[in-house]
Image (cartoon, rainbow, N blue to C red):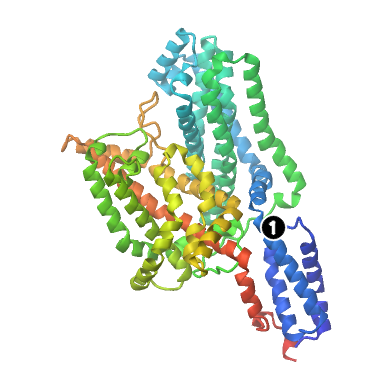
Amino acid sequence: QMKETSFIEQNKEKWKKFQSLASNQTSDPEEIADLYSDITDDLSYAQTFYNKRTVRVYLNQIAQGIHNLVHKQRKDSWKKLFSVWRVSIPLEIYRSRKNLLFALFVFIFWALVGAISTHFNPDFPRMIMGDGYVEMTLKNIEKGDPLGVYHSSTQIKMFFDITLNNITVAFYTFIAGILFTIGTHILIFNNAIMLGAFQYFFHLKGLLVVSFLGIWIHGAFEISAIAIAGGAGITLGNGLLFPGSYTRLQSLQLSAKRGLKIMMSLIPFLIAAGFLESFVTHNYQELADWSKWAIITISFSIIIFYYIIYPMIVARRHPELVHESDPPIKTYVNVFDLNKIRTFGQIFSDTFSFYRVHIGKIMRYNLVFTIPIIIAVVIFQDLVRYEDLTHQYEYDWASQLSIIMGFDVKSISDVVVTFLWTIILSIFTLSILYHFKNQEQRADLKAFTKFMLQKLPGTWLSLSFLFAILFYLPWYWMFLVLFVAPFFWLQAPSVVLGEESFGKRFGNGFRYSAKNYGNVLLGISLMSLVLFIFAQPIAAVFSYQEVNFMREPAMEDFLDKLADFIKNVSRYYTTDFMVPANIARQIVYIAFILFSLPFFVIMMGFLFYTSQEQTQSTGLRKQFANFGKRKRYQETSLDFD
């Protein structure tokens, strides 16, 4: 046993630091959490050997103070959400400033190439934008409405279509960087040369100022976002090109996180660009020139401030964070400690680790319980609504899902099918949450069946509101879902994983959801973003089939190519050649749902356990229950005197 004076002398500097953290309301909660386990170990030792001494009381007070501070700061998820935009993202922009500047210069260079090419060859825009678009623009110029293309649709529809298009183009530009930055350079070239040719085309018609004032009302945000996305794509690709001391895969993980932070910052600007194009540029002829100049100037000023000036301000305020070394790559674990408070970053990282460990068992259960039902339901719906399969739709993903899930409710069979899907999704959710309580258990069909029958009614009830907005809210209102769903997000894990009475668990779901609204909103947004980025080239939900002036479909992905191939082959065998192509789309969409949904449910589980620990301190109570049991790796030779 160590003498009390030696124990105090050995640890007093560390305790002073703890006490300083506990009294400082602006302390970093991550730093507190990292150091918290040390003070509890010291307290455990003091309770064992100096239980009636002052040092035990002193350490207990520090531990309680830090514990309360952790809870107080982690509850403020909104503050943490804003700090990401206020500090974390600007710092990442500052660290990636060379890539962003390079992307801007490359964009300007190709835009000048487009303008110069049009100067020497007035037909160059036809090569870039197509004859159809150029002819339409010439007709609009003759009518005295050179930017009449912006009047081609209703404003609400324009807003959704343009916003989705802007986001898709930006993220295509980013994710293409994974091809050693070559893909990003190609997309920058494509967009920049088109812009230069388009603007110079109007210059040749004597309409440069008119086109500038019309296009750059929304273009200030939209074009800037493409250049910034190019910088993020180069950041992503550089992780593969220049791995340094990491493996290429580890370097890619780190560069992807950096690029994603930059891409997150673009979402508000892309939405603003869609709004301006739909509601302001749409009425450009009715606006005074001074108002157009004002909008363009303000827009560029915001971009310059947030992406140039403000990152430098943040870097000067936090010089210690500018050159922060890259964190070590997380190693996977097979058993996760559930009784601890996780940061948002830990939740996000552990979600992917948990998925890797348990996805095999999750899918085994669903091969027995849900996938056979899904196959039966889809076949039934395709037979009942066969006529709907013979068409090609503007938004195929929305139309095909409405067919197989029945949420457009065209008949009583759709109501039955929708109800069956709520049962399917409830069982699927249970198959994921089951592994939180049975992490080390091998796939046991009998045990899961018993668990499922016991928990299914409560799970279905806890998910009922999410089902209602999922199946019956029009898809173009999904932006609203993003802000409403977090209030109900932790209902299911609370009902399934909680150990209180059903009423208490159900109520906790609402409390935990409201308390962690910011983290839930950020989690849903970021996870959706990650899945979108990796799904986009294969089968993106933003892909749509529409004849335009560039090509058909307007945004093509691998599934579009596959469906076209199946459609062309089927022409030789049946007049209903669209049916096989649409069935192929259904298969891909269902597979995407089955393999992406676990990410959201696993995140639900970790958020629930973090909320439970914040409220009930289950893990803390377990630590105190183990006080007096010394840890061998912390003992010294004096312990055996």
Q: Would you place residue 44 above or below residue 405 in this image?
A: below
In this orientation, which residue lies closer to the viewer: 121 or 382? 382
Amino acid tagged 1: Gln
| Residue 366 at x, y percent in the picture | 34, 61
Q: Would you place residue 31 above or below residue 162 in this image?
A: below
In this orientation, which residue lies closer to the viewer: 226 or 3? 3
Q: Is residue 353 visible?
A: no
Side of 217 where 627 appears, left or right: right
| In the image, farthest residue toward the bottom | 641
Mark 1 sits on what residue?
73
Q: Is residue 625 visible?
A: yes
| Residue 607 at x, y percent in the picture | 55, 59
Side of 78 where 408 appears, left or right: left
In this orientation, which residue lies closer to the viewer: 116 or 335? 335
Element at label 1: helix
Of the 4 image quadrants, the one containing the N terminus is: bottom right
Of the 4 image quadrants, the one containing the C terminus is: bottom right
Q: Would you place residue 114 above or below residue 614 in this image?
A: above
| Residue 465 at x, y percent in the picture | 45, 50
| In the image, farthest residue toward the left | 573
Q: Residue at x 73, y 66 (%)?
A: 66
In this orientation, which residue lies closer to the viewer: 28 or 497? 497
